[in-house]
Amino acid sequence: MPAFRFAVLAVLVGAAFAHAHYHMLLPDKPAVKAGEAVTFTFQNGHPFEHELSDATEPEAVYVVNPDGTRTNLKKELKKITVDGAEGKVTAYQLTFTPAKKGDYILVAVSPELKGGGKLPHKDVTKVVLHVQTQKGWDNDAVDDTTTPFDLQPLTRPYGLTPGTAFHVDVLDAEGKPVRRCPVEVERYNATPPKVIPPDELVTAVSRTSRTGTAVVTLSEAGWWCITATKDGEKAQHRCTLWVYVDPSPTK
């Protein structure tokens, strides 16, 4: 059972987002060498429980290169099926080969989708692929044509070990902090766990501080999603960053 801990910079709140669905954009390897192909899988569902449902095709998929330029990857996207909670469900994959050293930010933008709330939700999902050289992980990956706000890492989103305090900023389209913005954290399980703990031990929920910052502690090795949520006039916007925590180094 994972033990979630949040630093004092964020105010803990109740598990208002229990059983939330998230979009997952996961590479088969979190770090590679230049010229090495990586397969990314885009799927939807409950990460901790590994209860997957049909994913809707993203309306945009692109990569932000280490120099800040963008490359459109939508044509590389292929529809596949994966094991869901009740049989096969739809997911998507693409293969990407980084040509040079540096950090590449893969971004998937989903269309507006109806959920259980009053507003449809529109998701932006990001993950950083590290390629040998530490350059570009803090590049801007979205703009106001993509989403009205962004979740940006202040901590380098790779080379992490269990117990690392991870800092993020939530900023609006003008770069101003989004105060008291809900931030959720959940660990991904590649297979359904035998025992599902109570909701509050599956998804940790916090809010940003006055400066738009949240600090989370990623307690275990594996993939984690960090999601900020902001209501707009016509849709609930969510921005998710996936980060990988390496196992503790052998002493």
Image (cartoon, grey):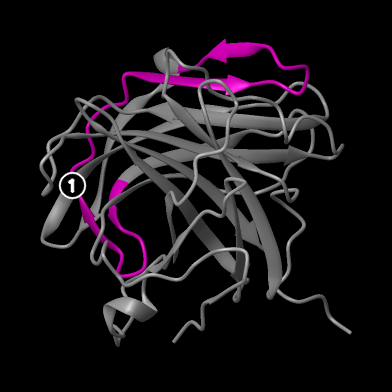
User: Horizontally, is 69 left or right of 177 in the view?
Assistant: right
Decide: is 220 above or below 17.
below
Residue 210 image point, x, y percent: 57, 50
Q: Is residue 177 left or right of residue 238?
A: right
The residue closer to the viewer here, 107 or 8, is 8
Residue situated furthest front in the rendering? 210
Q: Is residue 226 above or below residue 96?
A: below
Is residue 71 in the magenta section?
yes
Please name the residue shown 36% across and 74% down the image.
202
Left-right relation of 227 to 243: left
The magenta segment is 44-73
Say which quadrant the C terminus sits in. Answer: bottom right
Image coordinates of residue 141 in percent, x first then y, are 59, 25
Q: Considering the numbered disc 1 on the image, is that residue within a helix, a strand or a loop? A: strand
**Image quadrant where one finds the N terminus:** bottom left
Q: Which of the 4 image quarters holds residue 206? A: bottom left
| Number of other residues with Cα within 10 Å of mark 1, as a class: few under 14, some 14 to 19, many 20 or more | some
At label 1, the amino acid type is: Val
* Residue for point 83% across, 32% down: 135
Q: Which residue is mark 1?
A: 89
Q: Can residue 84 be seen in this snapshot?
A: yes
Q: Position of residue 168 (x, y in %)?
A: 62, 49
Tell whether position 227 is magenta.
Answer: no
Image coordinates for residue 29, horizontal then vertical, percent: 62, 49
**Quick check: 65 left or right of 43?**
right
Q: Is residue 209 above or below residue 229?
A: below
